[in-house]
């Protein structure tokens, strides 16, 4: 059976650990490969390689670093089919969606191609008599990223695209559920000319994550995953003196105003709630129609649209979505559906018990729709991360704004309306990090930044764009004076705090 190995110092290695983790084929319910689970010693090996390579990489001028990114972009495009198929085979998302996963990551690489401009500091000439002040952004050194299963290409590239371009050495710990694409992405970086030791991949679970968080030489950690682990990573990393950003789970709401174009909303909702089997942190698993009449009309249109969805294997070009990632996850999602029923929500469409002919062991779940979900229900409060749409009816605009604002998560939210004033008020008032106005999945483009609020994001910085540049660098401030001769020996002014007055 195929084993996915670490990528350390530019080479594949099994490492010294004795444990491994199964990688499923979600279409057929069989184990297709294993991944080596690393230890603190494996991490140490990667840190040594990073330590040896990073100073020279940092000293390479930013334009040359950017050239590696240009080459990398081309290489990833050339390997798009291979990457998308590999990604789809371990994750279960349909191939077209897997291409989108790679493409959204590539857009961060495109941003990183402009790193010389992004790294320019600020300069003030003549801040005082003969005094100039300037700032420069310097890399942190050795840094790390810990990523989730649901975007195995995009999220690593969110991080290492900017991070490497800034002159750091990056150690990636991808999800153990679909680790093959992250390794291929690192191999392609080597092919693009990146020196060995600057982008490395170590596999593992909590043991490896803890080793990363505790390692003195790792100066910053970016984490994306579920909120409980994000909070843990944030606390432990900060306690160890690191710079940490930790993105967590989500429960994004879509507010539907009475004036919205409901046909458009139904089409947007179907994709945003059920695409990738709901395994997206920017999915829209909660819909909030404003007013009973809007709710009834929406429900009438939503049910046939849901029944028309095609669930298929991830290589089925006509499938809207594929299986979920593991048998445990399928069980968990179905458990939440049962919980919703037990809590008294109305299960309008039940996706449980779905079986795909010829793939009976695959981890498929049909689409589900709940109506009359209320904010006190556990199944509303928690993230389900599956193909389940919950309808929460609101009586008024104010009630609709309050729902996502008061929810424990604050990743994304969307409003569907033709009323510019309502949209503007909503964007201003809602207590959520990313807002869509008639845009169901408001993931900002690569040169802006990505990040949620509340339990969706611990730490105060976002991913990629200029926020990424700031996160992966430290700012040095230089005040300089080049006097024409020497100061007098007993200059009393030297004892007074200097001012520019
Ligand atoms: P997860 O939290 O299970 O795993 C994320 C990472 O943490 C993996 O690399 C995993 O190996 C590691 N990990 C798992 N258990 C750990 C433990 N006990 N201690 C230390 N590390 C541990 O998340 P997942 O299931 O892979 O991904 C789905 C979650 O990620 C969802 O909650 C989703 O909303 C969230 N997500 C958030 C964003 C965002 O930007 N906010 C983006 C994508 C996914």
Image (cartoon, rainbow, N blue to C red):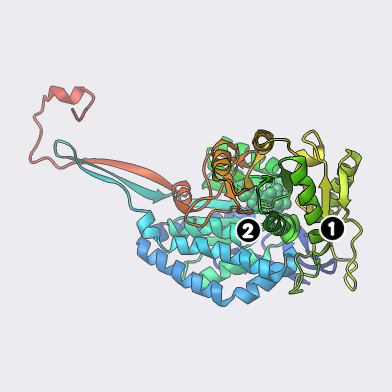
Q: Position of residue 456 (x, y in %)?
A: 64, 42
How far, Cα to Cα, is label 1 from label 2? 25 Å
At 55% from the left and 77% from the top, the residue drawn is 78
* 220 to 311, vertically: above or below: above
Front residue of 349/295: it is 295
At 47% from the left and 53% from the top, the residue drawn is 465
Q: Which residue is mark 2?
A: 202
* 168 to 123, vertically: above or below: below
In which quadrant of the rendered image does the N terminus lie?
A: bottom right
Q: Is mark 2 within 8 Å of ligand 1?
A: no
Q: Position of residue 261 (x, y in %)?
A: 66, 54
Q: Secondary structure at mark 1?
A: helix
Specify whether residue 281 is in view: yes
Image marks 1 and 2: residues in contact by CB distance under 8 Å: no
The image's mark for residue 327 is: 1
The answer to whether residue 352 is left or right of residue 118 is: right
Specify whether residue 391 is in view: no
Q: Secondary structure at mark 2?
A: loop
In which quadrant of the rendered image does the C terminus lie?
A: top left
The answer to whether residue 56 is left or right of residue 223 is: left
At 48% from the left and 50% from the top, the residue drawn is 468
């Amino acid at each position: 059976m195929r084993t996915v190995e670490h990528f350390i110092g530019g080479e594949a290695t099994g490492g010294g650990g004795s444990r491994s983790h199964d990688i499923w084929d979600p279409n057929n319910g069989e184990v297709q490969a294993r991944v080596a689970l690393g230890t603190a010693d494996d991490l140490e090996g990667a840190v040594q390689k990073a330590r040896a390579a990073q100073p020279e990489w940092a000293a390479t001028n930013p334009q040359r670093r950017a050239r590696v990114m240009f080459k990398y972009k081309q290489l990833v495009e050339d390997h798009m089919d291979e990457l998308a198929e590999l990604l789809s085979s371990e994750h279960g998302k349909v191939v077209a969606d897997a291409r989108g996963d790679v493409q959204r990551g590539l857009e961060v690489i495109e941003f990183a191609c402009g790193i010389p401009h992004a790294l320019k500091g600020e300069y003030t000439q003549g801040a005082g008599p003969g005094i100039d002040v300037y700032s420069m952004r310097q890399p942190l050194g050795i840094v790390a990223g810990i990523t989730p299963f649901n975007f195995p290409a995009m999220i690593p590239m969110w991080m290492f695209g900017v991070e490497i371009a800034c002159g750091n050495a990056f150690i990636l710990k991808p999800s153990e559920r679909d680790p093959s694409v992250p390794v291929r992405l690192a191999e392609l970086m080597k092919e693009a000319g990146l020196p060995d030791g600057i982008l490395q991949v170590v596999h593992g679970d909590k043991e490896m994550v803890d080793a990363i968080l505790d390692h003195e030489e790792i100066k910053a950690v970016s984490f994306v995953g579920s909120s409980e682990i994000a909070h843990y990573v944030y606390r432990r990393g900060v306690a160890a003196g690191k710079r940490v950003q930790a993105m967590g789970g989500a429960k994004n709401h879509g507010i539907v105003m009475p004036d919205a174009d409901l046909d458009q909303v139904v089409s947007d909702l179907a994709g945003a709630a059920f695409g990738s089997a709901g395994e997206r942190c920017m999915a829209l698993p909660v819909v909030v129609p404003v007013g009973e009449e809007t709710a009834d009309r929406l429900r009438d249109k939503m049910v046939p649209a849901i029944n028309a969805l095609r669930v298929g294997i991830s290589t089925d070009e006509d499938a809207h979505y594929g299986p979920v990632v593991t048998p445990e996850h399928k069980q968990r999602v179905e458990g939440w559906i049962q919980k919703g029923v037990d809590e008294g929500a109305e299960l309008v469409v039940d996706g449980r018990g779905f079986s795909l002919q010829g793939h009976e062991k695959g981890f498929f779940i049909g689409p589900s729709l709940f109506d009359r979900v209320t904010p006190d229900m556990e199944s509303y409060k928690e993230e389900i991360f599956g193909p389940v749409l919950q309808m929460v009816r609101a009586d008024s605009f104010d009630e609709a704004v309050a729902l996502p604002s008061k929810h424990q998560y604050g990743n994304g939210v969307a409003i569907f309306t033709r009323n510019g004033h309502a949209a503007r008020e909503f964007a201003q008032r809602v207590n959520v990090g990313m807002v869509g106005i008639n845009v169901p999945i408001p993931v900002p483009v690569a040169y802006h930044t990505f990040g949620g609020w509340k339990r969706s994001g611990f730490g105060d910085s976002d991913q990629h764009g200029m926020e990424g540049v700031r996160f992966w660098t430290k700012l040095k401030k230089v005040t300089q004076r080049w006097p024409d001769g020497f100061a007098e020996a007993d200059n009393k002014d030297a004892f007074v705090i200097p001012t520019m007055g």
